[in-house]
Image (spheres, rainbow, N blue to C red):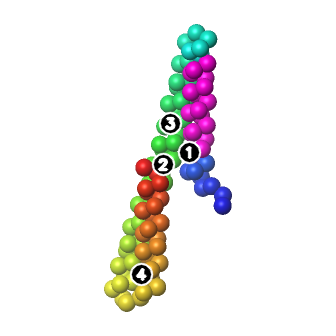
Amino acid sequence: MSKNHNEKRKDEGKAEELGGKIKKNVGKAIGNDRMAAEGKGQEVTGKGRQEVAKSDERSKGKKEELKGAVKNRAGALVGNEKMQVEGRAEETKGEARQKKNK
């Protein structure tokens, strides 16, 4: 299964965060304040990228959850069990996406 766009963005953010931590610590170890500051900047930028990607995923999850809830309720109204089951599945998928990206 291939990763979606936001999963890739989270991975890139993690890599940038890790690279920044390494650079920051190396800068501190060798007494290079500029390198340490640049590393801290990269670390913060990486964390920010991860948070943006997670926020996007939470929004998608909420949309899926609401769409599924509507489909579930509509199915119940018209007596269509298949529609209810599909709606509940989509609702659950959206809830899981949101939970994964807290």
Residue, far bottom? 79
Instruction: Report the residue marked by disc 3.
Output: 47
Marks 2 & 1, CB-CB < 8 Å contact: yes
Instruction: Report the residue marked by disc 2.
Output: 54
| Real-space Cα separation, disc 3 to disc 4, in angstroms | 39 Å
Amino acid identity at mark 2 = Lys
- Range drawn in magenta: 9-26
| Quadrant of the image occupied by residue 17 | top right
Which element type, helix, strand or loop, lies under badge 3?
Answer: helix
Amino acid identity at mark 3 = Lys
Which element type, helix, strand or loop, lies under badge 1?
Answer: helix
| Quadrant of the image occupied by residue 79 | bottom left
| Quadrant of the image occupied by residue 67 | bottom left
Image position of 3 (left or right of 83)? right
**20 within the magenta span:** yes
Instruction: Report the residue marked by disc 4.
Output: 84
Marks 3 & 4, CB-CB < 8 Å contact: no
| Real-space Cα separation, disc 4 to disc 2, in angstroms | 29 Å
